[in-house]
Amino acid sequence: MDHVHLFLKEDTTWPASLDSTTIYPRPGLPDVGDGGKPRLVSSVSVSHLREARYTDPEKDGTPVGPYGDEVFTLETALARTKWIQSRYVDGHYGTSTIGDGSSGYGGTTGFQKKHSGATDPDGWLGKQELTKLFQLAGMSVEVTD
C-alpha cells in the first residue's frame, strides 16, 4: 500500500493518534534542507516565515527555501484547521498559503480575519496568531520571534 486517504467529518478534530504519523507532501516535490522532503518541526520563527514569504521560489522544478520545514508546519496547521486544502501542504509559502481571506480555504489571510478581527487582513501571522493556529490544530509548536 503506497498511501491512505483519511476523511474526517466536518467539525472533527485531527485524531491525536495520528500526531506522530509522518506526513508526506504530494509526489514530485524536490528535495529540501537535508536532502529529504519537508517535515514537521517543533518550533517556527515569525521572522523565518516572513522571509520565506518574501523569498520562496516558484514551485515548478525548484526546491523550497531554507525555511521549508517551518512553512510545511504552518501549512499543516492551516490544513488541519481547514484554512487550506491538504494538497497545498508542500513547504512553499505561496498564494495558496496566503489565501484570499474567504470562508473555506482562506489561508493565513482568512485565519487572520476570523481570529484577530482584522477588517483588512494582510495574511501576516504574528506570534499570538501563530500560537492560536497551532493550538487550534492540536499541534505542540513553539513560536519564536
Image (tube, helix red, strand yellow):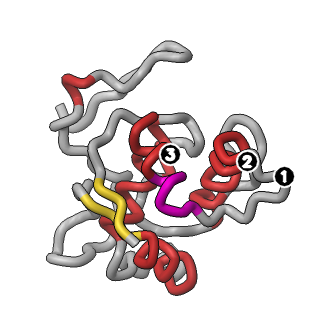
Please give the residue where the numbered disc 3 appears in the rendered image: 78
- Residue under pointer 1: 119
- 17 sits left or right of 134 in the view: left
Looking at the magenta stretch, what is its main secondary structure? Answer: helix
Please state which amino acid type lies under the numbered disc 2.
Answer: Lys
- Name the element at disc 3: helix
Crowdedness near tag 2: few (<14), some (14–19) or many (≥20) residues, C-alpha within 10 Å: some
Q: Is residue 71 left or right of residue 85?
A: left
Q: Is residue 100 left or right of residue 32?
A: right
- Given this view, does label 3 or label 2 mark the residue nearer the observer? 2
Mark 1 vs mark 3, CA separation in Å = 20 Å
Residue under pointer 2 = 113
Q: Quadrant of residue 123?
A: bottom right
**Residue bounds of the magenta highlight:** 125-130
Q: Where's residue 60, x and y in %?
A: 50, 75
Asked if the residue at tag 2 contacts the one at tag 1, i.e. Cβ–Cβ closer than 8 Å, the answer is yes
Amino acid carrying mark 1 in the image: Thr
